[in-house]
Image (spheres, rainbow, N blue to C red):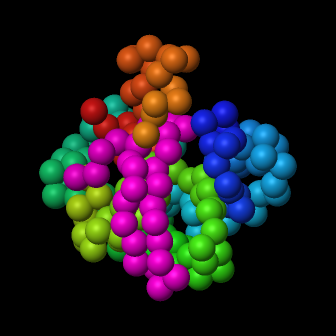
Amino acid sequence: MAARLVDEQIDAVVASDLQRAMDTARALATTIQLDITPRVDLREVDLGSWTGVSRDELERDNPGAWRSWRVEGIEGWEGGERYEQAMVRVGEAIAGLAGQWQGKTVVAVTHGGCIRLATCHLLGMPAAELGRIMSIGNASITEFLVEPDGTGRIVRLNDVAHLLEQTTADDLEPAPTTEFDALP
């Protein structure tokens, strides 16, 4: 990803403060000689009681909640964050970055669920519809053109062209790092 973006005019790099996002951001920031601004508001959706539980465990131990989540988009976890809450958080992050960096290019390194929620937000879709957004691959590039008021449009989504020379088709299946990416 860093090699793909090195020739872009990037003005800032922000990232979820979670380690895997910071590691990815570091590769880019080092290459283009910018600092990273860590941001809590770019974290993945907090799954509460489902955090760290595998898909197989959920299907086996709580099939009703699993099915409700998969079929109806109803969050089955206790505690944590609801999609609507997460989308408000992500929408506010987008608007804040757009207002702060008007006319500039900001790379935000975040997570698949966060990118899907940002996509729903910019398309005016309810958060519960995020399951309709494609799976977001690790180190893929999604680009939004965002106005200072936080409205915007999608320029590219889940672009993995920079990974094709280095990987096989099997490698492009996102690693199960979040509740979204663990789905078929």
Judge from the rendering whether residue 172 lies leftward or rightward of residue 13; answer left or right: left
* Residue positioned 60% across, 58% down in the render: 108
Residue 174, percent across and down? 43, 32
Q: From the image, which quarter does the C terminus lie in?
A: top left
* Residue positioned 46% across, 30% down in the render: 161
* Residue 96 visible from this viewpoint: no
**Part of the protein shown in magenta:** 132-158
* Residue positioned 39% across, 27% down in the render: 173
* Residue 32 visible from this viewpoint: yes
Q: From the image, which quarter does the N terminus lie in?
A: top right
Q: Quadrant of residue 93?
A: bottom right
Residue 114, percent across and down? 46, 58
Residue 54, percent across and down? 42, 36
10 or 113: nearer the viewer: 10
Q: Is residue 25 magenta?
A: no
Q: Is residue 134 magenta?
A: yes
Judge from the rendering whether residue 115 lies leftward or rightward of residue 25; answer left or right: left
